[in-house]
Image (cartoon, rainbow, N blue to C red):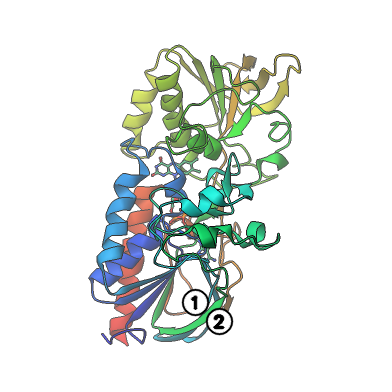
Amino acid sequence: MSKNGKRGSVLVIGGGISGLTAAVEAAEAGAEVIIVEKEAFLGGRVARSNLYFPKMCPPTCGLEINLRRVKTNPRIRVFTLAEVDSISGTAGNFKVVIRRHPRFVNEKCTMCGACAQVCPVERPNAFNLGLDKTKAIYLPFEMAYPARFVVDPATCLGAERCGQCVTACPYGAVDLAMGPETVEVEVGAVIWATGWAPPDAAKFEGLGFGLYPNVLTNVMVERLTAPNGPTKGRLTRPSDGGPIRSVAFVQCAGSRDENYYRYCSGVCCLASLKQARYIREQYPDAKIYVFYIDIRAPGRMEDFFTATKADPHLVLIKGKVAKISEDTATRSLTVEAEDTLTGTKVVETVDLVVLATGMVPNGIGKTRVAGELVLDEHGFLAPVQPMQGMFAAGVAKRPVDVASANRDATGAALKALQHLSAE
Ligand SMILES: Cc1cc2nc3c(=O)[nH]c(=O)nc-3n(C[C@H](O)[C@H](O)[C@H](O)COP(=O)(O)OP(=O)(O)OC[C@H]3O[C@@H](n4cnc5c(N)ncnc54)[C@H](O)[C@@H]3O)c2cc1C
């Protein structure tokens, strides 16, 4: 394979677990790899979780290994805060234009935090889904790679720049004059690993998200139970900070639903069972209700389901939730469903509701591709692309858990390599 950026190169779009896996597998097999990630850090959605099922280990366990492989492999180039503007040409000889947004902090940053201490402006912390704030100059999270602060231009540069961070930095790392850059590369194959985003739960009629403070989504619960989250991991009732004595998990919130997303995201049942364990750890006596259509715990995940449902205070109710209402005085929530096993109406009043929302594909973003790229009816990239040399991996292709995303990404790397060596 040729060196640096020609026919032997693979472009990986998206630096989540799928993109990282595809990148290290391709690079360790000899290819030059370029990762383009739109955020300021690698790791994607997995970096934002508290613990992973089924092992219940923190995201650091899987990510750290991959990040180390990325950092130590000279064949991998990483562009964060970057997006692919266009891809032209054909397999084996794609021409790629990458747009890099400025970080305003250079490689001299030691993460000492002196800049953030003096910064007078705050912004919603996107990493924590806006549940807390950071300064306009911030570290996305403590394990972030690149291990460097970043300036949010919408907050800092939109107001009058004070430059206090520049003065406070003892290393000369803050450079507010940085501008955008365009980089052009040639690659032989492209792997789309653009992953997913949570849906806007406020549009799910009758479920009360955005109306009632004690209705949360599953992604919020991941942040609210994470030790590096906005509450340092302590989950309480959002309305008053009180303890959780009862919680209802609402499965298939917006999923398997003709009105919203018809597909099953495949992970939400296991995510709720995992989150039931978070609740149990913090509240040994809390009553936990799981309203479900079917519990989907394929293969060896069945053991995880069996172990979780052994909890004597966990009640599984087979029925899709029709309505959630709030008692305005107590802020408690009433959940109504029909139990399809008994044919009776079930009404439970709880302190907290968690909506088990699914994964919505990010697709190909704003990238212009000179050739036909096929997305399925839900916006996931079709597994077989008519364009030679284009592959998808992980949730960009279909909703999957991390283990499946890793297998998928390894397969995508292999396909990219086969393609390159065939040139
Ligand atoms: C509530 C919940 C809990 C979950 N818990 C678990 C669990 O415990 N265990 C488990 O195995 N799975 C879990 N999952 C599933 C897990 O989150 C996914 O399997 C995993 O995120 C897939 O990784 P990915 O790299 O495909 O996508 P992502 O994690 O979404 O990564 C995609 C990356 O691509 C970047 N990107 C997107 N578009 C572009 C673009 N145009 N240009 C450049 N970069 C781009 C994104 O910024 C991101 O970094 C959970 C899912 C949910 C909804």
For the C terminus, give its image quadrant: bottom left
- The residue at which mark 2 appears reads as 371
Residue at 36% x, 51% y is 404
In the image, which disc is placed on residue 196?
none
The image quarter containing residue 76 is: bottom left
Give the residue type that dot 2 points to. Answer: Gly
* Nearest to the observer: residue 158 or residue 396: 158
In the rendered view, would you say 242 is above or below 99? above
Residue 397 visible in the snapshot? no
Tell me where residue 52 appears, x and y as whole percent. Answer: 37, 40
Tell me where residue 347 appears, x and y as whole percent. Answer: 65, 15
Horizontal relation, residue 24 to residue 245: left or right: left
Residue 231 visible in the snapshot? yes
In the image, which disc is placed on residue 386?
1
Give the residue type that dot 1 points to. Answer: Pro
| Mark positioned earlier in the residue sequence (1 or 2) | 2
Work out how far the residue at label 1 is from the one at label 2, CA to CA, in angstroms. Answer: 9 Å
Horizontal relation, residue 383 to residue 212: left or right: left
The image quarter containing residue 217 is: top right
Mark 1 lies on a secondary structure that is loop
* Nearest to the observer: residue 174 or residue 5: 174
Residue at 61% x, 59% y is 377
Count of marks placed on residues: 2
Tell me where residue 177 appears, x and y as whole percent. Answer: 57, 73
Is the residue under label 2 in contact with that under label 1 (CB below 8 Å)? yes
Residue at 34% x, 51% y is 63
